Every structure is written in structure tokens, then in C-alpha cells.
Amino acid sequence: MPGTRARQALFTALADDRHIPHDVLTELAGQAGWPLPRRVRAIVLAGPNDAHSLAPHLVPQPTPQLTPQLAAALGQGLPGTVEADLCLLIPDPGPRARAALESALGGRVAAVGHSVPVVDAASSLRWARRLLALAAAVGGPAERVTFVDDHLSELLMLQDESLARALSARWLRPLEDLTPRQSERLEVTLLAWLESGGAPEAARTLKVHPQTVRYRLRQIEKLFGPAMREPRTRFELELALRSRRLLAQARQLRSRAHGPVRALGAAVQPLSPAGRARINGL
């Protein structure tokens, strides 16, 4: 099997969610001339780059910023495509190679998956693609690389959007009879309080007087009842509020799908509670 076809076959096997026996992967890797690493990370790129010529051009030579280990990892990358997404599987260069990896990607818009055993390469590819799919916004800072490691909780909450909506609807039902502005005001206050742990801290976050926060918290307790004092209820409410915020951002990003692509770290920055309060005149 020619080298190019052998590498394509190996990439296809590694990108497959079905379990491929390690001995089969070892045989394919031997045919492809690609030493099978113990752990890998996926890189998924946005843009018109040629996936099959990507690896040789990413890293010309090691530099003080680009260690030989990282240069070797990128130079040994296994390129391929998944549903038209341009991808690269690289031997995991370790957590300290992060800054050098960003530099080596040369300003490309990219998402870097989490480190996984080579037999689980499909997982790193799947979540890097998911991260990149959420990375769209109009204008803003320069393009940059984002890492799945930085967005694990967001990706987990958006893994099943229908379930996330059900969670929000279940726990935030007491707010349904309020006007949108009233509901937004109490949601912002409740989340700030849950995240900060107290009325004074929430007031500083929202840039309002502590008495304003305490007044809103009394309204919230009337709506949600004594269950508000239970740790599980507080956990579920925070999860529901965060999920609702992420779902709103995901909808907004999809509506801008034809705009310039930008990384999730810049695009899905949750609007600060104070910013949301100002927008809503709170």
C-alpha cells in the first residue's frame, strides 16, 4: 500500500469512534511508516489550508521557543480530514509545550484537543471539532488557538443541548411568570450570588449596592422556597443558569455562522454579570 494511502487508512482508523484493536493500529502504523505514540492530541484547523501538506510546513526548525520535542511532534503529525474539517494528530508534546504550539501554528484559527491514549484519538478529534464549530463571532481580537482543556465544562454542558434546555426549564420554572426583564435581573443576581458566595461579593460583581442584591435574593427565595438552602439545589441552579447562558451564546454564534471565524476563548466569553445588568438597565 503506497505511503499516502497507508497514512489515510491509519488516520481513518484512528478517527473512527468504534474500537479498533491495538494490534490492527500497530499494523496500519507500520504500513504508514508512522510510529504509533502512546498519547496524542488532535489539532483541527479552520481555513483553506491543505491538510496533507500541513505538517511539513508547520515547523521548519526547532528554536529556543520551539523545543525539539514539540518540533518533532508537529513534524510527525498525521494529517487527514473529518467531514471536510482539516485535522492533524500529533504525539502529545506535554502541557508545557502550549505556548510553543500556539506559536508553531502561525496565527491559524485552530482548536487543540485534549491528550488521550492513541486508541482514543477519535475523542480528541471529536471535541476539538466541537470546539471549533462553536468558534464563530464577528470582529474582535486577532485569530488564535483554543484548547479543549480550557473549555471542558462548557463542552460538557453543551454535549446534549436538548438535555441542557430540559435542565434549565426544570430548575428555573419559578421564573416563568415574570417579565423577561424581571427574570433576567433575578437570573443574573442569582448566578452572581452562587458564584461568589455572598451578597457583598455579588454586589461587587454586579456593580450595585449590597442592599439591592439582598432585596433580589429575598424575591428569589420567595419564588424558589426553602429548597434554596440545600446544597444540591444550589448546585443544580448554578448548572441550569450556566447552561442557559451557554445555550444563548451558542444560538447567537450560529446566527453569525457566515461571519469571520474566531476562537471560542474569545467568542464564547460569558458576558459579565455587570455587563448583562447594564444592557438590561438593572
Image (cartoon, grey):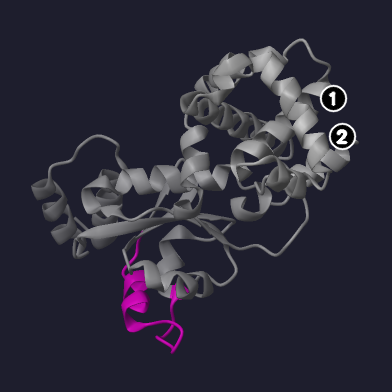
Residue 56, placed above or below residue 15: below
Residue furthest top as drawn: 177
In the picture, which quadrant includes the C terminus?
A: top right
Mark 2 secondary-structure assignment: loop
Q: Amino acid at mark 1?
A: Arg
Give residue 78's quadrant in the image.
bottom left
Decide which of tag 2 and tag 1 comes sooner along the chain: 1
**Residue 259 seen:** no
Q: Are marks 2 and 1 in contact (CB under 8 Å)?
A: yes
The circle on residue 280 is 2
* Residue 110 is one of the magenta-drawn residues: no
Q: Residues in magenta? A: 57-78
Looking at the image, residue 243 sits to the left or right of residue 19; the answer is right
Residue furthest bottom as drawn: 64
Give the CA distance from mark 2 to mark 1. Answer: 7 Å
Q: Position of residue 116 (x, y in %)?
A: 29, 52
* Residue 73 is one of the magenta-drawn residues: yes
Q: Position of residue 129 (x, y in %)?
A: 48, 45
Q: Position of residue 160 (x, y in %)?
A: 48, 26
**Residue 204 seen:** yes
Q: Which residue is mark 1?
A: 181
Q: Residues within 10 Å of mark 1 (few under 14, many from 20)?
A: few
Looking at the image, residue 164 sits to the left or right of residue 246; the answer is left
Q: In this orientation, which residue lies closer to the viewer: 31 or 91?
A: 91
Residue at the image position 84 percent from the left and 17 percent from the top? 179
Residue at the image position 70 percent from the left and 40 percent from the top? 199
Q: In this orientation, which residue lies closer to the viewer: 2 or 32?
A: 32
